[in-house]
């Protein structure tokens, strides 16, 4: 059984006045069950269905809801899908069952309270955008990013609070459900064996946007709101990452520490990181670089399968060797010098160019001398902070920046939900941007992290930079630099990067 449990409800038959039957809703149930199985890999026992024969009474739904909660634990993902009539009475939204109504907001609040880690609600009914979400997700310093990411609930509705939802004119299911099922089974949005909730709701919204343009008399604008840290990633297929091999070899005077593949379509290229074990002259370093070149020319190190197929069995065309004194130098990218070797098919006048100072030829070896090496090494030694101090300060900034980022994303989603116009979004952003900027600049003043947490620390800084990018698009200072379409595109790209960066930080937290 998977860690995803679902309740799929479709109400076709009604026995209350003012609610005509909806024959296609029982088909929605079957279509959704199939999409959850094919797309998200739920097994038969993971899905509870109500309405396959048309009737769904309130008690049956409540009993199914109770059954769903008993099947889930605190690490699970819970999905609730509803297709049927929706009613709006005195600005309160209701889901309509065969024999009565239940307040939609009560159901949302029920799901908010259940123990499952992640909850998703799909509503395919009229006026379904008439709901609210309780605040936005906050990140506390006591949490890990792994605990934060995906925790909470999200709601995606088929229409806004004033629109009806339609059955499809050419298919025996509803419009929204048809698109949702198609997206759940879409192989093109799978990345590294996963599908994200962000990509699901974005693609459903795109399909409905196209639908609206073709059917101006049957507009459906989906509404998405969430109280969730980041997004949810669903494991939907076996994924074996391409593992890059490495070459490590120790000799009397030097160590080949790492060989990185930097191949292009036109040349097989390696960047070699090497440690000098004793004081050596540049002439001696030059001879070592030739030894390393001879050893590495036949190397078979690749960053992906495409490069492997292109270059397997061929000699390297270009090799750079970067020399440091110790492992810390290599981790932090601080090198005494690097040498360049190219074969006869390359433009040697370009690769071996000199400037008389830092780039020069010594005994036929091209050197690039890093004149700042000693200064950076001393600076690093003098400014490396204690591990615990860096972790505490970084997590404190994380707690503020992630909370502000979620708040900002929520505002942007409400703008997409057409709850306010762009000018109002900019005004609301003005209340967040100064705080976010101050924490970002605070992050640039932290001390240098010890080598043992270098990767985690760097991933946090990448995340801080991505969050800072949110301040650039709906900022009064920069509005004239972009069109409205470009602002949306940039915001969407940054949101996707934000979710990816969160995932990376989460994966590296074991370092601390």
Image (cartoon, rainbow, N blue to C red):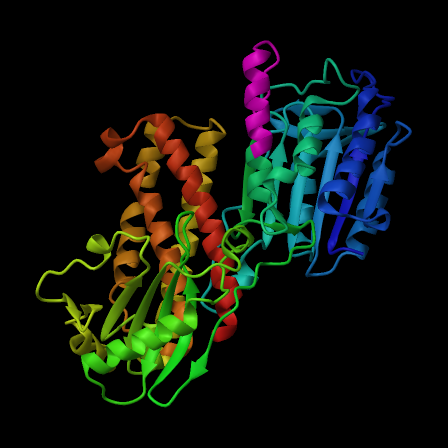
What stretch of residues is rendered in magenta? 203-222
Q: Quadrant of residue 162?
A: top right
333 falls in the magenta region: no
Q: Position of residue 288 (x, y in %)?
A: 30, 79
So how many labels did they put on this image?
A: 0
- Left or right position of 248 against 224: left
Q: Quadrant of residue 425?
A: top left
Is there any visible trace of residue 160 in the rendered image?
no
- Left or right position of 94 against 385: right
Is there any visible trace of residue 334 in the rendered image?
yes
Q: Residue furthest front?
A: 344
Residue drawn at x 61%, y 35% as measured from the top left: 156
Residue drawn at x 62%, y 13% as measured from the top left: 218
| Of residues 145 and 486, the one drawn nearer to the viewer in this rendering | 486
Q: Residue furthest left?
A: 356
Q: Position of residue 143 (x, y in %)?
A: 51, 66
Q: Residue furthest top?
A: 217
Seen in the picture, residue 152 relative to 339 is either above or below; the reply is above
Q: Position of residue 279 (x, y in %)?
A: 23, 88
Q: Main secondary structure of the magenta part?
A: helix
Quarter of the image with the N terminus in it: bottom right
Q: Position of residue 159 (x, y in %)?
A: 61, 25
Seen in the picture, residue 342 relative to 253 is either above or below; the reply is above
| Of residues 475 and 235, the one drawn nearer to the viewer in this rendering | 235
Residue drawn at x 45%, y 44% as measured from the top left: 495
Residue drawn at x 69%, y 24% as measured from the top left: 87
């Amino acid at each position: 059984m998977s860690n995803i449990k679902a309740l799929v409800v479709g109400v076709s038959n009604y026995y209350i006045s003012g609610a005509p039957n909806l024959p296609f809703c029982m088909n929605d149930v079957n279509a959704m069950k199939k999409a959850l199985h094919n797309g998200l890999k739920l097994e038969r026992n993971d899905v509870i269905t109500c309405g396959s024969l048309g009737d769904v009474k309130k008690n049956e739904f409540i009993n199914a809801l109770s059954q769903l909660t008993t099947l889930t634990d605190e690490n699970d993902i819970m999905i609730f899908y509803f297709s049927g009539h929706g009613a709006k009475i005195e600005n309160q939204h209701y889901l309509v069952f065969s024999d009565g109504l239940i307040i939609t907001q009560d159901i949302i609040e029920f799901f908010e309270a259940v123990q499952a880690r992640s909850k998703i609600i799909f509503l395919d009914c009229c006026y379904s955008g008439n709901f609210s979400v309780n605040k936005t997700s906050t990140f506390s310093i006591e949490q890990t990013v792994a605990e934060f990411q995906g925790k909470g609930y999200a709601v995606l509705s088929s229409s806004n609070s004033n629109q009806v939802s339609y059955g499809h004119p050419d298919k025996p299911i509803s419009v929204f459900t048809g698109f949702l099922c198609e997206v759940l089974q879409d192989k093109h949005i799978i990345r590294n064996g996963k599908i994200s909730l962000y990509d699901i709701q974005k693609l459903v919204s795109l399909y409905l946007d196209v639908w609206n343009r073709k059917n101006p008399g049957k507009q459906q604008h989906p509404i998405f709101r969430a109280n969730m840290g980041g997004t949810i990633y669903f494991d939907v297929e076996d994924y074996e990452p391409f593992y890059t091999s490495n070459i490590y070899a120790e000799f009397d005077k030097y160590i080949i520490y790492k060989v990185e593949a930097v191949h292009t379509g036109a040349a097989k290229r390696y960047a070699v990181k090497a440690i000098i074990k004793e004081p050596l002259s540049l002439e001696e370093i030059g001879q070592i670089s030739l030894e390393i070149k001879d050893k590495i020319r036949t190397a078979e190190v690749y960053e992906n399968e495409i490069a492997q197929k292109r270059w397997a069995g061929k000699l390297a065309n270009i090799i750079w060797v970067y020399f440091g004194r110790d492992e810390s130098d290599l981790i932090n990218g601080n090198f005494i010098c690097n040498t360049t070797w190219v074969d006869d098919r390359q433009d040697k006048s370009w690769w071996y160019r000199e400037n008389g100072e830092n780039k020069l030829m010594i005994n036929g070896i091209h050197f690039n001398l890093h004149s700042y090496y000693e200064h950076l090494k001393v600076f690093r030694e003098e400014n490396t902070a204690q591990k615990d101090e860096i972790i505490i300060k970084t997590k404190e900034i994380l707690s503020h920046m992630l909370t502000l980022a979620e708040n900002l994303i929520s505002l942007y989603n409400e703008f997409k939900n057409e709850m306010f116009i762009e000018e109002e979004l900019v005004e609301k952003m003005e209340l967040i941007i100064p705080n976010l900027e101050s924490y970002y600049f605070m992050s640039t003043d932290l001390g240098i992290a010890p080598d043992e947490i270098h990767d985690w620390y760097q991933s946090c800084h990448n995340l801080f930079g991505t969050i800072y990018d949110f301040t650039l698009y709906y900022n009064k200072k920069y509005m004239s630099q972009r069109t409205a379409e470009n602002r949306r595109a940039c915001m969407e790209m940054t949101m996707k990067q934000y979710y990816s960066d969160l995932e990376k930080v989460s994966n590296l937290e074991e370092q601390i």
